[in-house]
Structure formats: C-alpha cells, structure tokens
C-alpha cells in the first residue's frame, strides 16, 4: 500500500492505484483508492480534497456501477 500524507504523496498513491486498475488488478487498485479516500476525508488535507478527492470518488463510483469488461482474447 502506498504512503498517504501530503498532496504529492496522495497524488503518487492515486497514480499507483490507477496503474493497478489499468493493468487488470482492479480490486487492489480500488482498495488503494478507497483507503486514499478515507485518508483524505479523515485528514481534510485541503489540496488533496480539492484536486484528488473528486477524481477518486468519480472512479470509485464508476467502477461500482459498471463492472470491468474482461480483456478480449485473440483467436
């Protein structure tokens, strides 16, 4: 799990989570995003609330309502 804290650390954690989601490890990526959301909400770090939290919430909501499409296999 990445470290959380300042805007820079939170941005790095966000990027790690998105990389996991994009590489097919969606559950782990979402768990990082959920932990990041909770951390930002608990600490109230203003720059993270303003710049990162809206995107984190958007991704979590989209992934909850729309299951990922499995990758296609070449025949």
Image (cartoon, rainbow, N blue to C red):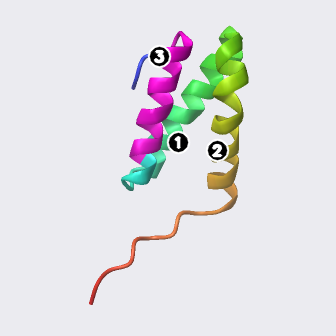
Q: Secondary structure at mark 3?
A: helix
The crowd level at tag 3 (other Cα within 10 Å; few <14, some 14-19, many 20+) is some
Q: Residue at x 29, y 84 (%)?
A: 74
- What is the quadrant of residue 20 in the picture? top left
Q: Residue furthest left?
A: 75
Q: Which residue is under mark 1? A: 30
In the visual, does 42 lie left or right of 28?
right
Q: Which residue is under mark 2? A: 60
Residue 39 included in the magenta stretch of the image: no
> Could you say which is closer to the camera, residue 4 or residue 28?
4
Q: Nearer the viewer, mark 1 or mark 3?
A: 3
The stretch of residues the image draws in magenta is 4-20
Q: Secondary structure at mark 1?
A: helix
Q: Nearer the viewer, mark 3 or mark 2?
A: 3
Give the Cα distance between marks 1 and 2. Answer: 7 Å
Location of residue 8 in the rendering, given as x and y in whole percent from the top left corner: 49, 16
Q: Earlier in the sequence, mark 1 or mark 2?
A: 1
Circles 1 and 3: CB distance less than 8 Å?
no
Circles 1 and 2: CB distance less than 8 Å?
yes
Give the Cα distance between marks 3 and 2. Answer: 19 Å
36 shown above or below 73: above
Q: Residue at x 64, y 23 (%)?
A: 38
Q: Quadrant of the N terminus?
A: top left
The chief SS type of the magenta part is helix
């Amino acid at each position: 799990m990445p470290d959380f804290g300042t805007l820079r650390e939170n941005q790095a954690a966000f990027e790690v989570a998105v990389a996991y989601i994009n590489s097919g490890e969606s559950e782990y990526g979402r768990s990082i995003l959920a932990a990041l959301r909770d951390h930002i909400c608990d600490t109230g770090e203003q720059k993270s609330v303003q710049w990162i939290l809206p995107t984190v919430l958007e991704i979590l909501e989209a992934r909850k309502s729309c299951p990922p499409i499995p990758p296609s296999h070449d025949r």
